Structures are given as C-alpha cells and as structure tokens.
Amino acid sequence: MDFMIERMEKMLYPGFMLHKTGKDGEDFLHYIPYSPEDERLGMLVTTAGSVVTRPYTVYPPRKQEHPALFRSVAQGRILPEFQIVYITQGEGSFTLCEADTTYKANPGALFLMPPGVKHQYKPDFETGWHEYWVGFKGDYFDRLAAEQFLSPDHVFFEVGLHDHIITLFNHIFDEVKAQRPLFQFKTCTFILELLSEVLSRERRREQPGYYQKIIEKAKYLMESNIYGMINLSYMAATIGISVSCLIKIFKTYTAMTPYQYFMQIKIHKAQHLLEQNDATITAIADRMGFEDPYYFSRLFKKKTGFTPSAWRKLVHAQSFDS
C-alpha cells in the first residue's frame, strides 16, 4: 500500500518527497520549553517544525504528538501565540472562520496568524502538502501587532517559493534542536528576519513599478534641492500627479512623508558639513536653507541625539584618536 501511495505522489506532484528535514530525512516537530530568563527577553519561540502530509492521509499526521490545543487545525482553532506556516509543496486551503473567508493555498502560500483569531487549514486529501511552521510570542511581537505590522486583517500571503525563506526556517530548526545557551534569543532573531522578509516582499508586491518611479523622481528632486526648502506643489507638478497623491504614495512606500524624508537627508548633509569644515553652526544652518539656526539645532538633535556642536566635537575626537 505504501508503495502505491508513493507512486501516486510522484504522479500527482513530481518531486514531492524531496524536501525532507534533518540529516535522517525525517519530519521534525518540536514544542519548546522556556525559562523565566527567556520570558524576560520579550521574545519566545514556542514551536517549530516541518512535516510532509502524504496524499490520502488524515490531517494533521502524527496528531498525538501535538498538544491538544494545536490538534484541531483542520476543524478550527484559536491559538494564544503567533504562528507562521509556509507551504512549499502540494495544495490545500486556509480559512478565517469568523470572516468566513477561504483562500486556496498553493506552493509559496504563507499564513501569518496572530493570537486570538479562529482559523483552520488543511491540505487537499488527494495531494497532501509540505509545511514549515514556527510559533512565537512575547511583548515585542505584541507591540508589532499593536502598531499593525502584524495584522489580523492580513494573514494570508502569496510570497512564492524562495530558498532564503527555507534557509531561515532551517536556521530556526538548527537552534531549536541544539538548544545552546540563549538559543531563544538567537532563534527569535531569525524569526524577526523571516517576518521582515515576508512583509517587505508583500509591500513590494502591492506597489507597482509606477509607484517606484514616482518615488525615485521625488527623491531626485529633493536631492537636487537639498540646500533649499521642500516645495510639494512644484514636485507634484513636475512628476505629473497631485500633491495628495504624492504624499500618499511616498508614505506608503517609505513609511515617511515627503517632508520627513527631506528633513532627514538635509540633516545627513549637515552632518557631513560639520565633519568636513569649521564653519559656524549659523553658517551651516544658513547653507542648508534654515533661516533660524535655533530651529536647525533643535531638529538636528531630535534626529541624531546630538546638538550640532556636540556632533562636531564627537567626530573630531574620534578622528584624533584614530
């Protein structure tokens, strides 16, 4: 019977059994204990695994190896933690239960579930699938959710198949298996990198090339007028869009308004001037287009943590030491 299933797997999904985890070729799943010291980090990995569900197999396989709270994934469950699930082979479905919304999960689909949201997912019975997952929790991740970086309204992603994502999962698995001192801390750095990879890919996917060209033109105009002051009406007219559209696209793409970005590059240029010559602070403020040197100094300190004179002393002292 196993031989027939394996032949069916190869017919339905060539190469299905190629992605194995671990040197022995076996699936990997682990639920991870943590100490009070780990909890003080504000970031915890709680579970990690990679399992192949073969065609015509009840899901989830090896059900009794999961805690009771996690077993009802095919019928619907609510978790007290975040989870990322990445599908690399096979097909299935993912459902947000309260919204009654179901997504088709093909290879490259990824679920990013926050705690407290009822959901279910499972592979198609005829194809099975290969899934990677990691569970995590902690104050830091809660803050990401509070700031809408991790949103219950956006949990299904079609990121595609990427070696780098698989590599990050394997780094997580290696740390979980070895459990060296402070492995929780190191593992969570890989989780953060995984989150940033997924979210940045999604942002790039949602923003067409047309937007990128607008941003590039806007940045060019700002750099060309770095010694003056920003003129959004002129910029928008030059690019060929409205001011409101320019602000919306720029903020969506960079997470800053055009004004905030312009002030940032002006401060960077002022840092360079402070490093390269002994002109007075007033002269540099005037050079950068600030009529009020006191406003320039306040803005400089807000952006850098140093007053202009303190920055100059710091840079000169380091140059002397070297």
Image (cartoon, rainbow, N blue to C red):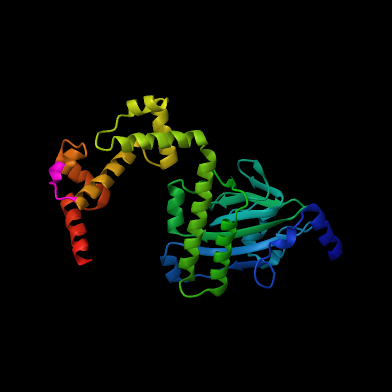
Is residue 252 shown to the viewer in this render? yes
Q: Is residue 278 magenta?
A: yes
In front of the other: 231 or 226: 226
Q: Is residue 119 magenta?
A: no
The residue positioned 65% from the left and 46% from the top of the image is: 95
Residue 322 vertical position relative to residue 266 in the rendered view, above or below: below
Is residue 75 shown to the viewer in this render? no
In the image, taking residue 217 as reference, residue 117 lies left or right, namely right
In front of the other: 115 or 112: 112
- Percent position of residue 144, x then y: 44, 51
Residue 182 vertical position relative to residue 218 in the rendered view, above or below: below
Q: Quadrant of the C terminus?
A: bottom left
In front of the other: 177 or 221: 221
In front of the other: 319 or 204: 319
The residue positioned 30% from the left and 43% from the top of the image is: 265
- Percent position of residue 53, x then y: 73, 59
Among the 4 quarters of the image, the one containing residue 40 = bottom left
The residue positioned 15% from the left and 37% from the top of the image is: 292
In the image, taking residue 9 as reference, residue 119 lies left or right, namely left
Q: Which segment is the magenta one?
A: 277-283
